[in-house]
Amino acid sequence: MLGYLLRRVLAAIPVMGMVALVVFLLLRLTPGDPAAVLAGDTATPAQLERIRASLGLNEPLYIQFFTWISKLLHGDLGVSLISNVPVLKMVGQRVEPSISLAVSTIILSVIVAVPLGVIAAWKQGTWIDRFVMALSVLGFSVPVFVIGYVLMQVFAIELRWLPVQGFRSLADGFGPFFQRLVLPTVSLSFIYVALIARMTRASMLDVLGEDYVRTARAKGIGEIAVLFRHALRNAAVPVITVIGTGFALLISGVVVTESVFNIPGIGRLTVDAVLARDYPVIQAMILLTSLLYVTINLVIDVAYTLLDPRIRY
């Protein structure tokens, strides 16, 4: 296992290096000038040149790249061109809302979707199966912002059970933190419940006809134990892939939900940085997102080996 993990970690190093190079070149070679954004529309050429010199943007690309990499290896993600705040501090201020929303969404989705998928496969062709598949289609079809506004209208405005928008840190107390997380979590969970339920159903259908399932039933093992202990364990590999990938997507791509519920997360920070051409923030967010994907893929690979040790060889 240790050798397998070491190989996976070493394989991630050139991937991150290539991502860093592509991100750097992509931002530098696309049209637009951050100096013009900073200086405003009335800036003179001399003022633009001074700003470029202070930011190091008039240096050759290879010098800019190696300077940036050197700082990156020392934990310096740079300083925002717009707010003049260290990027690491900006990310630290925004990471709790996004991670809280992602974790709560994945937990709720798994708790709801996996049993639904197992039951749908077990009752294939019945009204239960058709009902679960109809819910899945509905979850895929309705946009997240529509679900969010409907839940907001019903539970926040009409019933007044929950706050309309905003985010409160866990340090402010679990009650306020939980209340402001319920509606965005439920809104975002719809599509992931649909995705995980369909994947669980398809994987379970592949294994329910296997010999070991029939043998377990012939031994008199209860149906619940057969479904969740024997069949689900062997059907879990593609389900874990969907869950892991979904978690990475949630952290880096919850822009719509954060906008609807006014949550100051990483997604909104990234969009704001792109609109302002804030190079350091954009570079940092793409690199951190890539690192997140690599880490989650590593965790998924480890989970594979725990479920099926043959995979590590």
Image (tube, helix red, strand yellow):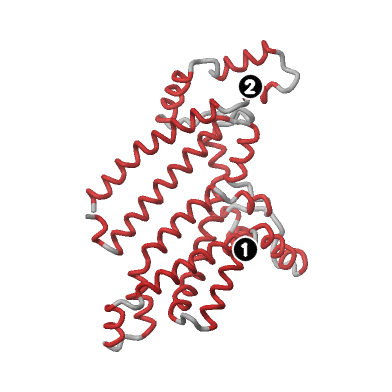
Find numbered disc 2 in the image and state the secondary structure of the residue it sits on.
helix
Q: Is residue 35 above or below residue 144?
A: above
Q: Position of residue 79 (x, y in %)?
A: 55, 28
99 and 307: which one is in front?
307
Outermost residue, front side: 125
User: Where does the image place residue 163, in percent across and percent down from the top left?
Assistant: 70, 60
Query: Which structural element holds mark 1?
Result: helix
What residue is rendered at 56% in x and 20% in y?
55
Q: Is residue 39 left or right of residue 131?
A: right
Q: Nearer the viewer, residue 99 or 225?
A: 225
Badge nearest the viewer, 2 or 1: 1
Crowding at label 2, few (<14), some or many (≥20) Cα neighbours within 10 Å? many
Q: Nearer the viewer, residue 90 or 149?
A: 149
| Mark 2 vs 1: CB contact within 8 A | no
Which residue shows up at 28% across the image and 59% down it?
305
- Residue located at (57% from left, 53% from top): 171
Residue 295, position in %: x, y? Answer: 39, 47
Determine the residue positioned at 36% across, 69% down: 235
Q: Return the disc, 2 or 1, that comes first in the chain's sequence.
A: 2
Using a 10 Å C-alpha cutoff, classify the residue at mark 1 as few (fewer than 14 neighbours), some (14 to 19) or many (20 or more): few
Disc 1 target residue: 141
As drawn, 125 above or below 164: below
- Left or right: 187 as drawn, with respect to 247: right
Marks 2/1: CA–CA distance? 42 Å
In the image, residue 80 lies at what x, y percent?
58, 30
Q: Residue 65 sits in which quadrant?
A: top left
Residue denoted by label 2: 35
Amino acid of disc 1 = Ser
Q: Is residue 217 left or right of residue 246?
A: left
The kind of residue on which mark 2 rests is: Ala
- The quarter of the rendered structure image containing the C terminus is bottom left
